[in-house]
Image: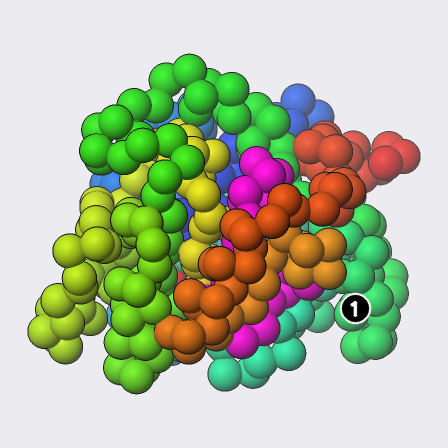
Amino acid sequence: MRLLSVIGARPQFVKASPLSLELRKLHTEVLLHTGQHYDPDLSQVFFDELGLPPPDYHLGIGSGPHGKQTGLMLAAIEELLLRERPQAVVVTGDTNSTLAGALAAAKLGVPVAHVEAGLRSFNHAMPEELNRIIADHLSTWLFAPAQSSREHLAREGVTGGVHVVGDVMADAIRMHGERARMRSTAIPRLGLEEGRYYLATVHRAENTDDEKRLRAIFDGFARLDRPVVLPLHPRTRRRLEELSLRPSSLIRLAEPQGYLDMLRLLEGAACLLTDSGGMQKEAYYLARPCVTLRDETEWTETVDVGWNTLAGADSERIVASVRSMIGEPRPQRPTLYGDGYAARRIAAILAGEAA
Ligand code: UD1
């Protein structure tokens, strides 16, 4: 098939690495970057490290309020679809780029393939939840990471075209994990000692845009028993400046890290503290315990098997959760989201071959 893939934000560059590789074995792919993430350390570094093909189109849309950002993408993607005439559009995850790609295609009658379909947090205040629900309902192919995603879709009446294929981020770790271990010098570079620090990320609007939550998270970090290394998303950096919030010296602020350094930092950490969706799974794949700084998660299986716990934005719970996650050995790690070959299955299904 002639496919057009829409990407735009950091986690989508990671997902594009296995996807583009496998899609291009069986199909022709046109790659479109919306420009949602534009800082070199949120975008270009991933293309360089992951060997991604350069985008055929870069829309350069950048930041803005949700309506404007999504609207600008929608108009530009529509124009390109009319020019390129792909047989299907591939979108991943739950960002505004996902929504714009799916909506522009569906309105033109171009079938949509949604990778990471069927995830639900059941929190409609999250822009990501709205994006993923709409993308799912517009899609012809719904590539789900787990059986639970298929069940969420069935409850919403979506049963056709659903394929449980596993998680393409597990594919990315399979492809790049060893290289991260060999190449990354992030741990010594940041003055850290293997196993003797915590890794944290904070970027969700629900945390950064709520002063009380953000202060409570930083208060929790400051009360931990080891240094916390926190690569800062630009949104979070700006909020800290706006609020004149000066984190404790136990919190080591760092620039956003590339994919290989981030994998290495995660692997060397005693525990991950995060509000990212993708990193909860990456922690599980690398056998690191995770404390999630949210009130709910889409990746409920990681909690069910005892490797992830929800601490919200509550400093007491953050401290207690870390203590209990590292206090005793974690249980066995069953395979939750596939075997690291999800992208290959997706390419085969799109080609009309059996999964
Ligand atoms: C987006 C996704 C989220 C994903 C995350 C990964 C949506 C609604 N959210 O959130 O699902 O987990 O990406 O990082 O699509 N900014 C920069 N430089 C950049 C990019 C952003 O400075 O390269 C700043 C902008 O000021 C912007 C803010 O960060 O206002 C937020 O960026 P935005 O594109 O809204 O999404 P994320 O918060 O990164």
Asked whether residue 55 is in view, the answer is no
Along the horizontal axis of the image, is 185 left or right of 191? right
Residue at 79% across, 61% down: 148
Residue at 41% across, 36% down: 195
When the figure is inspected, residue 255 is found, relative to residue 49, above or below; the finding is below
Residue at 42% across, 75% down: 316
Quarter the C terminus occupies:
top right
* Residue at the spot of label 1: 153
Q: Quadrant of residue 351?
A: top right
What amino acid is found at the position of numbered circle 1 in the picture? Leu
Asked whether residue 261 is in view, the answer is yes
Is residue 290 covered in magenta? Answer: yes
Residue at 47% across, 48% down: 271
Q: Which residues are magenta?
A: 283-301
Find residue 49 and report its horizontal and vertical position in percent: 37, 26
Quarter the N terminus occupies:
top right
Q: Nearer the viewer, residue 226 or 163?
A: 226
- Helix, strand or loop for disc 1: helix
Q: How many marks?
A: 1
Q: Quadrant of residue 15?
A: top right
Along the horizontal axis of the image, is 251 left or right of 171? left
Is residue 108 covered in magenta? Answer: no
Find residue 281 and report its horizontal and vertical position in percent: 59, 48
Find residue 243 and report its horizontal and vertical position in percent: 14, 77
Q: Quadrant of residue 76?
A: bottom left
Along the horizontal axis of the image, is 262 left or right of 121? left
Ligand 1 is in which quadrant of the figure?
bottom left
Along the horizontal axis of the image, is 269 left or right of 252? right
